[in-house]
């Protein structure tokens, strides 16, 4: 009997006995079923923004796998992207679950907690993707495309704008330009904050979707056409650094801690600002007229502070605008608006 038990495979058994012997363990089957159900529920809780974000992570992971020989740590990058995707799914599922329990007054803090982070994590996602570009910029092309953009700027402007601006540099102008450059960080926060406080969820997630599409277009272009920008390419050709006040110091600190070497074309500063500008035009017209002069100054400042070429700015205008129109198509597709609002609030479109 002991030999039969140890070497059961050496002895013929009946069909019924074999089925019982090799049937899946109940606990393992229950765990697998639970995982599949939770994954399905997380996917069902995703809105248009999440599918764009997850699609970008999936596409960039495929590109990393295909061009792994050009990267130092491809497996680590794919693992990090998988982790970010898992966080997005878990956050979507958690917010949906607790939103369904909003009637329980004892759980109101938890509901608000998950609701807040579900709505504001896109800003962190954009930051993650931008910082990641520092490692993906040579994913496909090992060289730099700066020479072509410098030639384009000369053809368009008659001079090299980044170098030409130096003769205008003075502390007051530099401080104003650095302030204008800094405003990039607040456009989407301001517009999103207004829509969030007014509980206009439909418009809020539409704006996030416009921005996501614009950013994704820019990230993919940066992977295919790496540009490091005048700060690196023209280093040593200026007679000195830019001198200003507190905003100049703040920008210097931000750039020192988070500057990405590469991904200058198209300008993600301009593309991100355009997403907010077009969103304001569509959803809060008074904010549009407030944003426009500041965004115009910001576009000029990106060249003045030596971070971008004029071509980068034009590229950002195009990708940001493209993000708006493609994002509108996504949100206006059959069911996209209603499902997106419902998934992000736990309420149907008609209840809002």
Image (tube, helix red, strand yellow):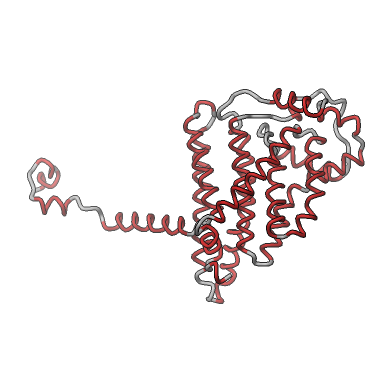
Q: Position of residue 102 (x, y in %)?
A: 54, 72
> Dividing the image into 4 quarters, which one contains the C terminus?
bottom right
Q: Position of residue 242 (x, y in %)?
A: 86, 34
User: Tag count in the figure?
Assistant: 0
- Residue at the (83%, 42%) spot, across then down: 178
Q: Is residue 338 above or below residue 9?
A: below
Q: Position of residue 285 (x, y in %)?
A: 74, 59
- Residue at the (67%, 36%) spot, across then down: 266
| 105 sits left or right of 248 in the view | left
- Residue at the (45%, 58%) spot, across then down: 44
| 330 sits left or right of 320 in the view | left
194 or 249, nearer to the observer: 194
| 25 sits left or right of 197 in the view | left
6 or 76, nearer to the observer: 76
Q: Position of residue 119 (x, y in %)?
A: 61, 59
The part of the image, by quadrant, that contains residue 251 is top right
312 or 108, nearer to the observer: 312
102 or 215, nearer to the observer: 215
């Amino acid at each position: 009997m002991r030999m039969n038990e140890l070497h059961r495979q050496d002895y013929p058994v009946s069909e019924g006995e074999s089925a019982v012997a090799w049937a899946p363990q109940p606990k393992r089957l229950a765990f697998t079923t639970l995982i599949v159900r939770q994954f399905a529920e997380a996917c069902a809780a995703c809105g248009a923004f999440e599918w764009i974000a997850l699609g970008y992570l999936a596409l960039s992971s495929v590109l990393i796998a295909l061009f792994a020989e050009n990267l130092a740590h491809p497996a680590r990058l794919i693992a990090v992207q998988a982790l970010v995707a898992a966080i997005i799914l878990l956050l979507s599922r958690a917010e949906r679950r607790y939103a369904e329990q909003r009637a329980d007054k004892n759980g109101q803090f938890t509901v608000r907690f998950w609701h807040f982070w579900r709505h504001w994590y896109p800003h962190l996602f954009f930051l993650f993707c931008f910082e990641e570009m520092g490692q993906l910029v040579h994913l496909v092309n090992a060289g730099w495309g700066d020479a072509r953009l410098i030639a384009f700027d000369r053809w368009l402007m008659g001079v090299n704008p980044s170098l030409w601006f130096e003769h205008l540099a003075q502390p007051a102008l530099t401080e104003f330009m650095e302030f204008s450059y800094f405003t990039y960080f607040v456009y989407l926060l301001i517009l999103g904050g207004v829509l969030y406080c007014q509980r206009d969820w439909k418009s809020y997630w539409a704006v996030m979707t416009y921005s996501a599409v614009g950013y994704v277009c820019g990230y993919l272009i940066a992977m295919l056409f790496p540009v490091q920008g005048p700060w690196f390419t023209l280093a040593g050709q200026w007679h000195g650094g830019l001198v200003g006040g507190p905003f100049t110091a703040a920008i210097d600190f931000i750039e020192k801690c988070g500057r990405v070497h590469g991904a200058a074309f198209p300008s993600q500063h301009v593309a991100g600002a355009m997403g907010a500008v077009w969103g304001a035009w569509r959803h809060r017209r008074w904010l549009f007229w407030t944003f426009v002069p500041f965004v115009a100054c910001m576009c000029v400042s990106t060249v003045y502070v030596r971070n971008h070429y004029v071509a980068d700015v034009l590229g950002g205008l195009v990708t940001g605008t493209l993000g708006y129109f493609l994002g509108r198509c996504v949100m206006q597709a059959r069911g996209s608006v209603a499902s997106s609002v419902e998934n992000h609030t736990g309420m149907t479109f008609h209840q809002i």
